[in-house]
Structure formats: structure tokens, C-alpha cells
């Protein structure tokens, strides 16, 4: 197992955000984490990236317990940061280099990886960023920034990708290309958090459902099975029962909350 969580809890500013989470993620698995805003999806990804640490329970990465002291060990920290890439929902927080080319090259250069320039050329080409390599990232559109951030993460050949609302700011064509890339990369373990139900089945073959104020994982199984479980989606706040009138008749049916 690449990740093993047991009774994990995380408090932020004294407030419990995650409680009693227990699940494992296998090497090469694609997992989509679903839930409404505020349920702890981003906090979970930050914990998986060791930016936040458990205040209860435990987490292991490739068998190694993850806590602040573990990241103090320089060889392990270097290995962990090279193997785990985290795409922030707000990619502006990730982009700080003077040019797009420097942004994509930053990780390979910091990690001392071979052929940094070749990595830049490859991923800039894939994400159609080559004409932008000399542009400052802050000048780009939201979708262009997202593509730069993805190129920068993939340039270090990560073992794990943690994606927070991966398709936000991407137009449908680029969202589709990203989904195809993730599906083709059997060497990547992907944990993708979203509240966009329409993309859930494409992002992962396994779904985890979180809910505000509820401990543990409400659902762990196939995305298609979750999407058929209207009662659970309503309980988690991802759908609601809506009443309206058609031709003088009162009807009620379910609506999914599906806006990025």
C-alpha cells in the first residue's frame, strides 16, 4: 500500500476537520474524493502531502509513518517531495518563478534530475505551453496557469499525484485531455478531490465520500454505485430533493449539486 490511514483526525485552529478516517490506497490506484465544500477534502490532500499532520490516529506512506519528525530527515524528505506532487485548487499559490520555463524546470533542478531542459520541452509541448515559455506565469489566464502547474508537477516524474479540483479553470477539451492522461498512466497513483459529480467516474475507479460534521468515510466503492445512491448523496449535501410544478401537477425529484 502506498497510503495507509488509521483513525486519522486533523484539527485546524482547534477545530476538528477530519475525524476517524481509515482507508488505504494501492500503488497505481485512481481515487476520487467527493464531498461538498468544507467537508475536509483539501485538508485530506494536504495531509497526504505532509503539509498538515494528523492530530489523532496515523498515516503511513509506503510503510513509513508520516509526522513532522519524519520530514526532518533530509533523505526521506527529498524522496517524499520527489515522489508526491500536489496540485493546489488555487494554482497561484504554486507559481512563483519568473517565467513559465523556469516554473516547469524548478522541480527537476531542485531534485537534481537528469535532462531538466528535455523535461521542460516535453511537458511544455504536451500542454501546448511552448509559445509561453518566456512569459511570466502571473500574466497567463486561469486555464494556462493550471496547465503550467500540471506540467511542473509531471516534470519530476512523480509517483503520486494529489489533485484538488483538477479540472477547474480548464475548458472541456483540456479537462478531457487531462482525464485521458491520468487514465493512460498506470504508473501514477492519483487521489483527486472534487465536488463535481459529472467528472467523478472519469477521474477515478474508486470513490470516497466525506460529509460535513460526520466522522469517517461515508462511502468507499465505485463512483457509479455512489452516483446511483441518491439517499447518500442527499445526506452528504451533494444532491437535494426539489419540488416544482409541471402543468399544474406537483412533482419532486433529485438535483445533483454539480458546479465548480
Image (cartoon, rainbow, N blue to C red):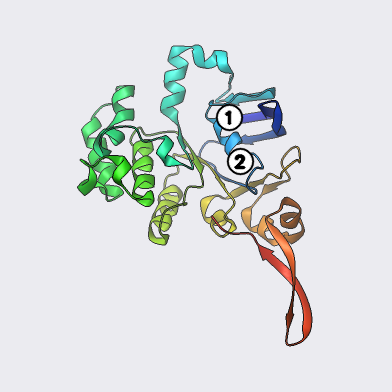
Number of numbered tags placed on the structure image:
2
> Does residue 177 appear to the left or right of 260 in the view shown?
left
Q: Outermost residue toward the bottom? A: 247
Residue 171 vs residue 117, the one in the foreground:
171
Circle 1 is placed at which residue position? 47
In x, y percent, where is residue 44? Answer: 60, 35
Image quadrant for the N terminus? top right
Q: Quadrant of residue 238?
A: bottom right
Q: Is residue 1 above or below residue 121?
A: above
Is there any visible trace of residue 7 in the rendered image?
no
In x, y percent, where is residue 155? Answer: 33, 36
Badge 1 marks a residue whose secondary structure is helix
Residue 11 vs residue 193, the one in the foreground:
11
At a point 71% along the width and 56% down the height, the residue shown is 233
At a point 29% along the width and 48% down the height, the residue shown is 126
Circle 2 is placed at which residue position? 41
Return the disc, 2 or 1, that comes first in the chain's sequence. Answer: 2
Q: Quadrant of residue 241?
A: bottom right
In x, y percent, where is residue 236? Answer: 72, 51
Label 1: how many Cα within 10 Å (few below 14, some 14–19, many 20+): some
Q: Outermost residue toward the right? A: 250
Q: Is residue 60 above or below residue 25?
A: above
Q: Quadrant of residue 96?
A: top left
Q: Is residue 77 above or below residue 47?
A: above
At a point 50% along the width and 40% down the height, the residue shown is 28
Question: Are the residues tagged 2 and 1 within 8 Å (C-beta)?
Answer: no
Is there any visible trace of residue 71 in the rendered image?
yes
Residue 7 vs residue 87, the one in the foreground:
87
Label 2: how many Cα within 10 Å (few below 14, some 14–19, many 20+): many
> Does residue 72 appear to the left or right of 57 in the view shown?
left
Amino acid at each position: 500500500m502506498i497510503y495507509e490511514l488509521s483513525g486519522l483526525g486533523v484539527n485546524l485552529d482547534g477545530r476538528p476537520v477530519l475525524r476517524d478516517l481509515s482507508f488505504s490506497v494501492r500503488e497505481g490506484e485512481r481515487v476520487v474524493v467527493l464531498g461538498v465544500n468544507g467537508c475536509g477534502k483539501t485538508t485530506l490532500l494536504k495531509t497526504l502531502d505532509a503539509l498538515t499532520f494528523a492530530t489523532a490516529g496515523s498515516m503511513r506512506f509506503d510503510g513509513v509513518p508520516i509526522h513532522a519528525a519524519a520530514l526532518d530527515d533530509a533523505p526521506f524528505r527529498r524522496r517524499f517531495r520527489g515522489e508526491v506532487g500536489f496540485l493546489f485548487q488555487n494554482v497561484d499559490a504554486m507559481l512563483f518563478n519568473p517565467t513559465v520555463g523556469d516554473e516547469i524546470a524548478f522541480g527537476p533542478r531542485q531534485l537534481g534530475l537528469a535532462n531538466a531542459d528535455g523535461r521542460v520541452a516535453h511537458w511544455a509541448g504536451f500542454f501546448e505551453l511552448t509559445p509561453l515559455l518566456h512569459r511570466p506565469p502571473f500574466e497567463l489566464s486561469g486555464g494556462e496557469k493550471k496547465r503550467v502547474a500540471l506540467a511542473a508537477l509531471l516534470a519530476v516524474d512523480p509517483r503520486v499525484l494529489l489533485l484538488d479540483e483538477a479540472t477547474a479553470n480548464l475548458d472541456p477539451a483540456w479537462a478531457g485531455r487531462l482525464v485521458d492522461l491520468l487514465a493512460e498512466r498506470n504508473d501514477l497513483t492519483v487521489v483527486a478531490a472534487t465536488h463535481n459529480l459529472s467528472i467523478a467516474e472519469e477521474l477515478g475507479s474508486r470513490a470516497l465520500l466525506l460529509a460535513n460534521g460526520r466522522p469517517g468515510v461515508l462511502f468507499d466503492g465505485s463512483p457509479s454505485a455512489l452516483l446511483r445512491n441518491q439517499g447518500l448523496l442527499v445526506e452528504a449535501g451533494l444532491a437535494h430533493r426539489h419540488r416544482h410544478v409541471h402543468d399544474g401537477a406537483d412533482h419532486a425529484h433529485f438535483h445533483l449539486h454539480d458546479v465548480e
